[in-house]
Amino acid sequence: MIEFNDIYFSRSTGPVLEGIQLRIKKGEYLGIMGDNGSGKTTLARLMTGLLLPEKGDVRVNGISTGDRNRLLEIRHSAGTVFQNPDAQAIGETVEEDLVFGLENLGLPVPEINKRIEKYLDLLEIRELRHRTIRTLSGGQKQLVNLAAVMVMEPEYIILDEPVSMVDAGHRRIILEHITRLNHEGTAIVHITHDPDELTGCHRLIVLSGCRITHNGTPPEVFNQLFVEKKMDVPAPFAISRELGLPPVLTTEALLEEICQLK
Amino acid sequence: MSIEIRHVTHIYDAGTPHETRALDGIDLTIGKGTVFGLVGGIGSGKSTLASLMAGLDSPSDGSITIDGEVPSPGKNVGILFQQPEDLFFERTLFKDMVLGLTHLGLSEEEVEKRIFFTLDQVGLSKQILSRSPFHLNRGTLRLAAFASVLVMNPGYLILDEPTASLDPGSRKRLVEIIKRISEDITIIYISHRLQEVIEVSDRLVVLDKGNITFNGTRSDYLDWGAGQDGGEYLPILNQILYRLHQLGLDVDLKVTQREDVVEQIRRTLERT
Ligand SMILES: Nc1ncnc2c1ncn2[C@@H]1O[C@H](COP(=O)(O)OP(=O)(O)OP(=O)(O)O)[C@@H](O)[C@H]1O
Ligand SMILES: Nc1ncnc2c1ncn2[C@@H]1O[C@H](COP(=O)(O)OP(=O)(O)OP(=O)(O)O)[C@@H](O)[C@H]1O
Ligand SMILES: [Mg+2]
Ligand SMILES: [Mg+2]
């Protein structure tokens, strides 16, 4: 479990997060939305001790992120795909980057190779294996960052806008794979501005004014957001509501509802 | 007055095992006063073409001219990089914004006036000017980068994923700005967000592994996208319309706004 106990965090410009109370259970899929500057990335960085709260404490599987001696344990159980695709890579080439973390886990070479092949295949970026990361395109970097975290097979995966720069085909592959990993037991924290990415999550929270203002299942929260007209909701959800149909989250479900009326 | 791209090929790391043919004999004319949508899969060559048009690199083969001249950085072409931090190097946003403008020989007052006006346009407050670009949250950083390019008043504006990381409010504002300024400025709009590309573009080009696979009007694009398997080149609203059409419902496949899509569905349901 990742726990936030009454967290306060501020910057020179003022408070960023206040009184944050949050529990992310093992195997949960949590979506996070909120306007620019609402503190989403700050929240993500607090989860793995990249930032420390001024008040309250953050715990990962019971270990406080302030416990510097056990930070490595925390970072092994929770991996983050950062919002800036240039901020993450450690290795020079894609392969080196993936090998680095796996060697740290102490895995034998054949196992390392097997994992790298598996994830490069899954994300359909096999041909990038020997490329220099610096020279990759924006979307290619984003995919490599995802692979670098997935290959570690951590208990929690934290995604800060993981598909903001990939094409529709890769977006679908990634979202499907995130859902599959979650079904197999990985907890997912997924930050995004695009509600259509979040139709598979269990719970959705919205940050605003330093606090969690919405917290519920996706249909519950999207319904509130739709009524408040403050934030985007998935296109099929908005269309079903506007047509007076039972609210649905996906295109498939929308088509089904419409066909029943026909 | 236009951008003329003739037989442009661009190869990275030529002669090495990593040789990449990023552009492969591209021919394209971008007429003045259009919004030109540039889409395609990851690594298809969009940012490469952008940097060649901005004069940041020269093509391995072929030629590019803008209003008859070889492009050179800062000269009438503004580019918003896919990585917004690539635009900044000063300690404050103000210094960064001033830097470009002083090259234009403007007075101090004029410089301030233009900066304030542009910030207001994109929805940023003046307070942000004293902050370091590198300490901004990512969406605001991208908006600040957009403002820094816009303030230069370029004749041609290349926007590489301008709305990635923007919240819905900022995204809508940016789309409105683009619609408004495109009467005077030629805009090349690169994005994976097809809904926005469709909304702003007069013409679209699709790149695939360095080749042009589509070049035409917005309406032609919607026809073309419907014919591609999986419909992944269509924005989600048009995907929904197309699927309904396949199910035998009589809907207009060319509307692009959500209200219009809802209206289309409502009408066809009333008829049946
Ligand atoms: N390094 C920093 N120094 C100073 N202030 C910062 C820094 N990083 C973030 N902030 C400020 O903290 C607040 C929250 O930023 P954060 O990056 O968490 O927002 P966000 O919700 O992730 O935004 P976005 O949607 O743009 O990514 C913002 O007001 C931002 O300006
Ligand atoms: N500096 C470079 N050195 C070597 N190869 C490069 C360099 N820049 C880009 N490439 C390669 O050229 C091809 C085209 O890259 P480009 O950045 O133009 O793609 P893109 O269409 O902008 O992709 P994305 O949507 O992911 O941003 C890719 O295969 C990329 O890896
Ligand atoms: Mg952020
Ligand atoms: Mg690019």
Image: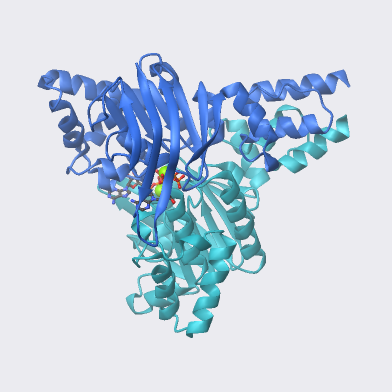
Residue B203: x percent and y percent? 51, 23
Q: Dividing the image into 4 quarters, which one contains the C terminus of chain B? A: top right
Q: Nearer the viewer, residue A234 or B227?
A: B227
Identified at 71% across, 34% down, the residue is: B240
Residue extending furthest toward the top: B183
Identified at 26% across, 43% down, the residue is: B133
Give the letter of the cyan chain: A
Identified at 48% across, 50% down, the residue is: A161
Q: Give the number of marks.
A: 0
Give the letter of the blue chain: B
Asked if A145 appears above or below B50 in the picture, the reply is below
Snapshot quadrant of residue A53 = bottom left
Snapshot quadrant of residue B256 = top right
Q: How is the image coloured?
A: by chain
Say left or right for B147 vs A138: left
Q: Nearer the viewer, residue A129 or A197?
A: A129
Q: Nearer the viewer, residue A62 or B63?
A: B63
Residue A257: x percent and y percent? 81, 37
Q: Dividing the image into 4 quarters, which one contains the N terminus of chain B? A: top left
Residue B33: x percent and y percent? 40, 16
Q: Nearer the viewer, residue B258 or A13?
A: B258
Residue B50 visible, this angle: yes
Snapshot quadrant of residue B226 = top right
Residue B199: x percent and y percent? 54, 25
Asked if A62 appears above or below A142 in the picture, the reply is below
Residue A154 visible, this angle: no
Say left or right for A26 vs A143: right
